[in-house]
Amino acid sequence: KTVATVSPLTLKKVVAPVKLLPNSSPSQRQVVPFEGVRKIDKTTLCKQKVKSYPRDRAHFYNKVVSVGKKYYFVLHYDEPKQSLTLCPMAVKGILSGRRQGRPRYQCVLEETSKNWIRSHSKDCKTVEAFMVMKTPIVAQEAWDILGA
């Protein structure tokens, strides 16, 4: 299929299915970008596993980024290519507890990867956000985005 541009920032529709990576388990699958739209399993789609986050430089592993006025979660960060696979985020309720009253952001996961986009890291800006649930499963995670 042809890759379609979705904004002037050269964001492209992603062809990012889910594959089992060597450091994944059958119950948790990470995104491996490639061409085409694929069916996804929300129950096993997990955040990108990294041995350790780089402390000496900026990175995009499991970060929330903004592109224009929209927020996205980085499903996959290819550091050598500076390429990001992004999933859109939306407000789904209000947080409770310590963060009571703040908007609860979650990833907008559909049956396929058709709403995922690929972008270059220079087109994205990381935003300060806190994971609320602390789960490896993307569909179960919620974020408190401080700039929102």
Image: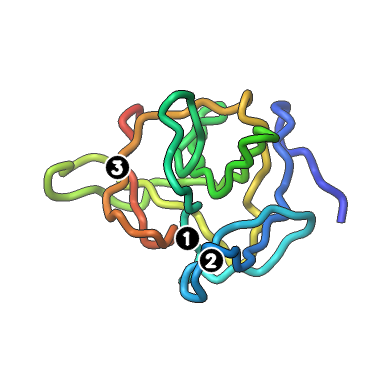
Q: Which tag, 3 or 2, sits closer to the chain's start?
A: 2
Contact between marks 1 and 2 (CB within 8 A): the answer is yes
24 vs 36, left or right, is left
- Mark 3, secondary structure of its residue: strand
Classify the position of the C terminus by image quarter. Answer: top left
- Of circles 3 and 2, the one toward us is 2
The dot on residue 46 is: 1
Q: Nearer the viewer, residue 136 or 109?
A: 136
Q: Position of residue 141 (x, y in %)?
A: 36, 56
Amino acid residing under circle 3: Pro
Q: What's the residue type where badge 2 is placed?
A: Arg
Above or below residue 36? Residue 88 is: above
Q: CA distance from mark 1 to mark 2?
A: 6 Å
Secondary element at tag 1? loop
Q: Nearer the viewer, mark 3 or mark 1?
A: 1
Could you say which is closer to the camera, residue 53 or residue 10? 53
Residue beneath the point at 64% across and 59% down: 113
Count of numbered marks: 3
Q: Quadrant of the N terminus?
A: bottom right
Colouring style:
rainbow
Residue 133 falls in image quadrant:
bottom left
Classify residue 100 as left or right of residue 63.
left
Q: Nearer the viewer, residue 76 or 23?
A: 23
Residue placed under numbered mark 3 in the picture: 103
Query: Would you name the residue on which mark 2 appears?
Result: 29
